[in-house]
Image (cartoon, coloured by chain):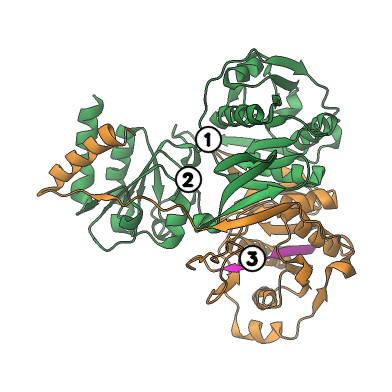
Amino acid sequence: MNIIACVKQVPDTETLIKVKPDGSGIDETGIKWVMNPYDEFGVEESLKLKEKLGGEVTIVSLGPARALETIRTALAMGADKGIHINDPALEGADAYTVAAALAAAIKNIPHDIIFCGQRAIDDDSGQVGAILAELLGIPQVTVVTKVEVDANTVKAVRPIEGAQLLIESSLPCVVTAQKGLNEPRYASLPGIMKAKKKPVDVKDAAGLGVAIDTKAKVVKTLPPPARPPGKIICGEEPAEKARELARLLREEAKVI
Amino acid sequence: MAKGVWIVAEQRYGAYRKISFELASTARKLANQLGEEANAILLGSGIEGIAAELGKYGIDKVYTADNAVFEPYTTDAHAAAVAKLVKEHDPSILLLGASTQGRDLSARLVGKLATGMATDCVDLQIVEGKLLAKRPMYAGKCYGEVMVSSFPQMASLRPNVFPAVENSKAAEVIKFDPGLDAGQLKTKVLEVQKDTTGKVDLTEANIIVSGGRGMKGPENYVIIEELADVLGATVGASRAAVDAGWRPQKDQVGQTGKIVSPNLYIACGISGAIQHLAGMGTSKYIVAINKDPDAPIFARADYGIVDDLFKVVPELTKEVRKLLE
């Protein structure tokens, strides 16, 4: 089985995000970069599939030079080879352009199933997997917590508001991973050593024949709106504080 | 030239999801500013009876396709039908909900329509005739203002943020042919397992009562559940509580869990790790109950009680019950 896992390098969830004073983006100094946690679930599922059905796992990532670390992490976990799309012209590209670049890199290599994270925790846009599926002309099953694959089909569990769906799709297919799908493994020391020798193919936009035409632009980045200072409710006893809180929620906030 | 503000309404088995009314009211507001029509697309099976209802929220025309192939929702059936209609009518703006269905469908449509989209928006404005969308990024640690330079300008709306305002119009219902061949669909829903707890999903809840590490164990959530019952609230949890196995994955609020935006969020025994704050920061009112006065959650809370939650929460349940009786 030819398995592809798309990964993105993002700031760690504990990172404090600082907005540049001119609003042109975020200040990247001191950020700890990690593999997008949802992509990690995709990589893990790819490796489990390979262990079960045989085949090969290819990691595809779009990002600057530092994104190579994330590809190496996936290779150290057990993936076989990588494709790194690295082009300064793609910096700030929107979801469509990113998906077009990924599609261009994937369309000419065999692909039975493609895993993406359900969204990246940096821009939180959650579009790339579905656009990639459309551009490759294949179906998608998004935000899944369980996957079963046989030769021609995938069955996946997708939680929605107030229900869980079991969806069947033909292969090839794009599957986007949600937390709960699995517990990603850690790279072993021998894995890390081996990863250094695994092939990573570097591509740029021109080499992939991708037109860079970003249509959705972040024109300004802002810090979150300040919340007015809150009220600490004082009192002698827990019961007294609880009574005052209930009153405030009812009379001042009018939310109960 | 692209004209009109369109929405994709959302329903399940003939009942609208609340986001549909939020979408309709928002489309009306933007359409008034542009001097254009606000129109809706409604797909489903047995939906003709509910189509005109969108007029109540300001929709001018509702385009419907009533076909068994649309229920339950699948990406390929819905995306093909919506894309066909959008290409025929060329709207300037296309809005969907940032619900599970809306997220799945809208992203596929971005691919089909080769356009751009701002996901999970919390504010939309018209500036010089164009849509300016405001959305949280990094799970709310910062915000981005997004403009889309192609048509339709797409945006998905965070549920529970945009008001549903009644603005009665006599909506015209127009049937359209989705031109679908069911044989070509590549995905199908084999099974729908409904949540039988009867609780509203966290992403749609008006009130959420959440418990964190301070709950000390799964057995103690009973006091959270009692408070939630009295308030008609949904129970949430922090990552610490989920990772400890105290609560199911679906209850997790935060950057790697659900992003929620209720009217009232009550955090019990949650210190307020940055990734948790990111997931509930757009809640209208935040209450923190924690015995540590230095817990970061207090910096975000509108009301805070520094005390033992095991004493405060049962008292709060009693007080709320008294008030609501």
In the image, are marks 2 and 3 on the same chain? no
Pick the residue in front: A219 or A167: A219
> Residue B140, how many percent across, how many down?
50, 54
Q: Amino acid at mark 3?
A: Glu
The magenta region covers: A1-11
Q: Which chain is green?
A: B
Quadrant of the image occupied by residue A159: top right
Q: Is residue A94 visible?
A: yes
Q: Check residue B260 in the rendering and tell me which mark sits there, or answer none.
A: 2
Q: Which residue is mark 1?
A: B162
Question: Hey, which quadrant is residue B41 in on the image?
Answer: top right
Q: State the residue in front, B236 or B143.
A: B143
The secondary structure that most of the magenta stretch takes on is: strand
- Note whether A179 is above or below B103 in the view shown: below
Q: Closer to the camera, B28 or A255?
A: B28
Chain letter of the orange region: A
Q: Secondary structure at mark 1?
A: loop
Q: Residue visible at 66% across and 28% down?
A: B31
Q: Vertically, is B248 above or below B163?
A: below
In percent of width and height, residue A4 lies at 76, 63
**Front disc: 2 or 1:** 1
Identified at 89% across, 70% down, the residue is A207
Please tell me how crowded label 3 is: few (under 14), some (14-19), or many (20+) other residues with Cα within 10 Å. Answer: many
- Position of B234 with respect to B148 (left or right) is left
> Mark number for residue B297?
none
Circle number at residue A44: 3
